[in-house]
Amino acid sequence: MPALLTVALLSAMAAQQAQAAIALDRTRVIFDGSQKSVSLSVSNQNKQLPYLAQGWIEDEQGNKIQTPLTVLPPVQRIEPGKPSQVKIQALPAAKLLKQDRETVYYFNLREIPPKSTKANTLQIALQTRIKLFYRPVGIAIDTNAAPPQEQMTLSKQGDKYLVNNPTPYYVTIVDASSKKDGAGVKGFEPLMVPPKGSLPLTVSAASVGGSPVLTYINDYGGRPQLSFSCNGSTCTVIPEKKA
C-alpha cells in the first residue's frame, strides 16, 4: 500500500508540473508572402520563475531548418508572468518557394525551466508544435469572397470518399459526420489535404452517408463545417448563405 500511494502521489505531481509555462497566442501561423516577417506573442504563465523559450522551424519531414524561414531570437529568457515576442523571418530563399501554392512548415517552441535547487526533482520541458503555412503573394485570400475550401469535392471510390482539393491551400479536415452539427463519426482520423491534391477519408462512405459534413480548420483556428450534396459518385459543397 505505501508503494502504491507513493506512485499515485508522484503521478499527481507530474501532472501538475506538466502544465505549460510558456504559452503561444495561436494554434497555426499564416506567413503572408508580402511580408518580411511575422511576430508571435508568447508569455510566461509561471508567476514565480523565469523560463527560457527556444524556437525553431522544421520542414514537412520534421527536419530542423534555418532557411528559407528562421526564428529570431532562437532562445530568449522570459521573466515570471511577463509577455514577449518571437519573430519568424523570411530569408531571400523564400522567393524560390513555389508561388502557385502554399508550403507547409512546423514552428516549434520549447520551454526550458530553471535548474531546480531541490534534490530528486522531476523537471518536464514541454514543447508546442504548430503548423506554419507560407502563403505566396499571388494566392492571397479575398476575405469578401466565399472560403476557398468550398471548392473541394468528394468522389466515391468503393466504400471510401476521396477528398479532392483543387485550391492552392492546405486544408486540414478534423471531423466528419452524416449531418450538420451531428456527432462525429467514430474512428475518424484528421488529415491534411495538400494543395491541388487528394486524400481518402479514414472512415467508410457508409458511416458519413449520402450527405457528408466535413469540419476543417480555417486561418484563425476556427472550425467551420462543409455540407456536401452528392449526385452519383460525386459530391459538391452546398454554399453557405450569407446573412
Image: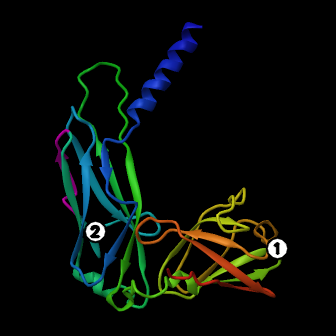
Left or right of 3 in this view: 71: left
**Residue where numbered disc 2 is placed:** 66
SS of the residue at dot 1?
loop
Q: Quadrant of residue 122?
A: top left
Cα gap from disc 2 to disc 1, whole angstroms? 43 Å
Q: In the rendered view, would you say 195 is above or below 11?
A: below
Q: Nearer the viewer, residue 46 or 214?
A: 214
Q: Dot 2 surroundings within 10 Å: few (below 14), some, or many (20 or more)?
A: few
Residue found at the far front of this picture: 243
Q: Nearer the viewer, residue 90 or 188?
A: 188
Left or right of 199 in this view: 75: left
Figure quadrant of the N terminus: top right
Q: In the rendered view, would you say 184 is above or below 157?
A: above
Left or right of 185 in this view: 81: left
Closer to the chain start, of discs 2 and 1, is 2
Amino acid, disc 2: Gln
Q: Position of residue 176 (x, y in %)?
A: 67, 66
> Mark 2 or mark 1: which is in front?
1
Region of the chain picked out in magenta, as a range: 72-80
Q: Position of residue 206 (x, y in %)?
A: 82, 69
Q: Position of residue 123 (x, y in %)?
A: 35, 32
Asked if the magenta segment contains residue 179, the reply would be no
**Residue where numbered disc 1 is placed:** 159
Any part of residue 202 in sight: yes
SS of the residue at dot 2?
loop
Residue found at the far top of this picture: 2
Q: Quadrant of residue 87?
A: bottom left
Amino acid, disc 1: Asp
Scheme by which the image is coloured: rainbow
| Residue visible at 41% across and 36% down in the picture | 18
Q: In the rendered view, would you say 182 is above or below 167?
A: above
Q: Which mark is residue 196?
A: none
